[in-house]
Image (tube, rainbow, N blue to C red):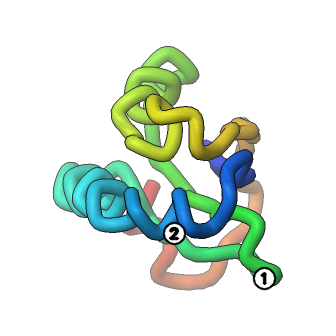
């Protein structure tokens, strides 16, 4: 399981211009059952995405498709996490 911390490098005006394309990217990976949750950070300096990918190579390939990434709008920090405990029902995401 991987957690992406998205950090904006460009002003919010640039983020807003590319938000529709970013949402289409998110929709693609939700439909492929790769993304579990995503959302904005508060204050609005970026976001986070929980991704169920098999390895870091897959993660990097997924990130490269995000317009925020390939247009230089945001940097990504990738955290590889091994779940040891989770709420009942979460196992369907594993």
- Residue that mark 2 sits on: 38
Query: At 45% across and 54% down in the image, what residue appears?
Result: 94
**Residue 54: percent from left, percent from top:** 45, 29
Give 22 or 26, whichever is nearer the viewer: 22
- On screen, residue 91 versus residue 1, left or right, reads left
Question: Can residue 33 be seen from the camera position used here?
Answer: no
Query: At 49% across and 50% down in the image, what residue appears?
Result: 51
Give 84 or 48, whichever is nearer the viewer: 48
* Vertical placement of residue 76 versus 43, above or below: above
Residue 12: which quarter of the image? bottom right
- Disc 1, SS: loop
- On screen, residue 42 versus residue 90, left or right, reads right
- Disc 2, SS: strand
- On screen, residue 66 versus residue 81, left or right, reads left
* Vertical placement of residue 81 versus 50, above or below: above
Quarter that holds the N terminus: top right
Circle 2 or circle 1, nearest the eye: 1
- Residue that mark 1 sits on: 42
Q: CA distance from mark 2 to mark 1?
A: 13 Å
């Amino acid at each position: 399981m991987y957690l992406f911390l998205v950090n904006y490098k460009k002003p919010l005006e640039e983020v807003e211009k590319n938000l529709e394309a970013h949402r289409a990217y998110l929709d693609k990976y939700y439909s492929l059952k790769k993304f579990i949750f995503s959302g904005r950070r508060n204050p609005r300096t970026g976001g986070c995405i929980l991704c169920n990918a098999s390895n870091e190579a897959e993660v990097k390939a997924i990130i490269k498709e995000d317009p925020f990434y390939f247009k230089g709008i945001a940097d990504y920090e990738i955290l590889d996490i091994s779940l040891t405990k989770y709420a009942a029902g979460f196992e369907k995401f594993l």
